[in-house]
Image: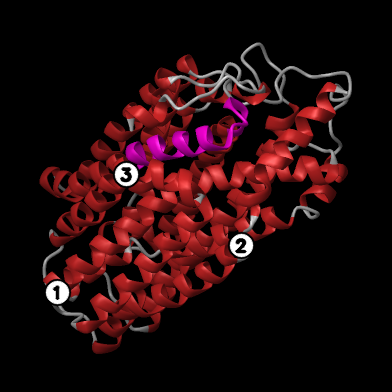
Amino acid sequence: MQTSLNHYSQNNEIHKDIPGRKEIIGYGLGDFGYVLIWTLVASFLTYFYTDVAGIAAGAVGTLMLFVRLWDGVSDIGMGILVDRTNSKHGKARPYLIWMPIPLAITTVFLFTVPDVGMTGKITYAAITYSLFILLYTAVSIPFKTLLGMMTQEQHTRSMIGIVGAFFIQSSALLVNMITEPMASGIGGQLGWVMTGTLFGVLAVVTLYITFRTTKERVGFVPTAKQEEKVKLSSGVKALFKNKYWMIITLFCISYYTLLGFVGAELYFAKYILGNASYFSIISLVKAVPGILAIFFMAPIVKKIGKRNMVLIGILSIILSTFIKYLDPTSLNYFLIGSAFNGFGKGIFGAMLYALINDTVEYGEWKSKVRTGGLVNSAASFGMKVGTGLGTAIVGWLLAFGGYVGNLSQQSDTALQMILYLNIHIPFLIAIIMFLLMWLYKLDKIYPQIVEELQRRKNE
């Protein structure tokens, strides 16, 4: 990886003043920070609501979808706000010092559900989860937009994504390994509150480091042609002329629907494999291949491109479902399948945001309107809808199967739903992801697009 980080050339305009190693690592630490909170909520909140707070599974599923749809709307608003922000710190960076502390506080509120009856619990969960989502959006959209503002150089973006993926995988591993043992060890809601507090503090610190170490280079200093702010109608019109943004957004919906099923693995460990603590082992087995892949990914990406690398990751996800299907009740088969699953997701973590930000250049080339914040927020809308759909499906299918939180033995239909959520449905989603990524052809024409954009700016 060290050699790859030093590949930079000074032969043309886009190679000038590109991020160095320290800045790339500083951005990666931000990945580590906000993913701590995201993984805690994505992996454990559904379980916390059903088996600790005692909220009905069907109500939890509906709540998750409703709040994530609201989240998608807030994403668009945040993207517009980032595009229109002009502070001494830039467009995206200021939000990394303004918003992490409120986000950390709200994360703790999520795991402090009062015992005020079912209606009261659902109301409290809806309010706190909606507030959490709003604040998370205020951090994640600027953070993702910042990647596109750090550099236009294609391979450098890939490298930032690869280094970020290392921190993402490490962050997710940390959360999935220690959350359940730590929360259970302390006991009750207090265990979850203390766990949320720990991750919230770490997120605040790492995001501040990102703010201090990064620099906005692309689209920050306006030219005479760029001084007038882009109207919302023009930005939205330009967005829907961007076919690669539409493809990547649909891909985000599919992939994040798949990620929304992560919480179902805890139910699988507890009720199919017979021990909830297996979830930590599964998380470790998933994370290690993804982390290892990062160390040899850079030269392969440079040779075959981001899109083809992602196709390899999708094939790995498909293979993982076949392996788990061979013997769904075997821990060994599930762990082997999880290893292939983790390898594929490690690739996605390294490539996805670079793919999204490449569509910013395509959109500017196509419509002569640059809307980095709107592109990232609209793609993030797809992510939030996907995650909401995934977590909602978990709750709905559990309820359909007659699942009752914290029973020692679930019904046969409930167990069947848990199997579907971990094997059958992920297979179908992976097929959809493959078809979408097959249509993504931007890698081949991206260098010519950037050259044309540079000529326009110099005219």
Viewer-side residue, 15 vs 183: 15
Magenta stretch mostly in which secondary structure?
helix
Tell me the distance, in whole angstroms, between the alpha carbons under discs 3 and 1: 44 Å
- Picture coordinates of residue 278 (x, y %)? 14, 61
Q: Which residue is mark 1?
A: 408
Q: Which residue is mark 3?
A: 296
Image quarter (top left, top right, bottom left or bottom right) of the C terminus:
top right
Q: Which portion, as a residue range, is magenta?
A: 148-169
Q: Which residue is mark 2?
A: 250
Viewer-side residue, 316 vs 44: 316
Tell me the distance, in whole angstroms, between the alpha carbons under discs 3 and 2: 28 Å
* Residue depicted at x 41% and y 23%: 26
The amino acid sitting under disc 3 is: Phe
Tell me the distance, in whole angstroms, between the alpha carbons under discs 1 and 2: 39 Å
Q: Earlier in the sequence, mark 1 or mark 2?
A: 2
User: Is residue 159 found inside the magenta-colored segment of the image?
Assistant: yes
Callout 2 environment at 10 Å: few (<14), some (14 to 19), or many (20+)? many
* Residue depicted at x 38% and y 35%: 163
In this picture, residue 211 sits left or right of residue 279:
right
**Corner quadrant of residue 172:** top left
Q: Nearer the viewer, mark 1 or mark 2?
A: 2
The amino acid sitting under disc 2 is: Leu
Residue 64 appears in the picture as rendered: no
In this picture, residue 337 sits left or right of residue 428:
left
- Picture coordinates of residue 411 (x, y %)? 24, 86
Q: Nearer the viewer, mark 3 or mark 2?
A: 3
User: Is residue 352 found inside the magenta-colored segment of the image?
Assistant: no
Check the image and tell me how it is coloured.
Answer: secondary structure
Q: Is residue 282 above or below residue 322?
A: above
Q: Earlier in the sequence, mark 3 or mark 2?
A: 2
* Residue depicted at x 19% and y 59%: 282
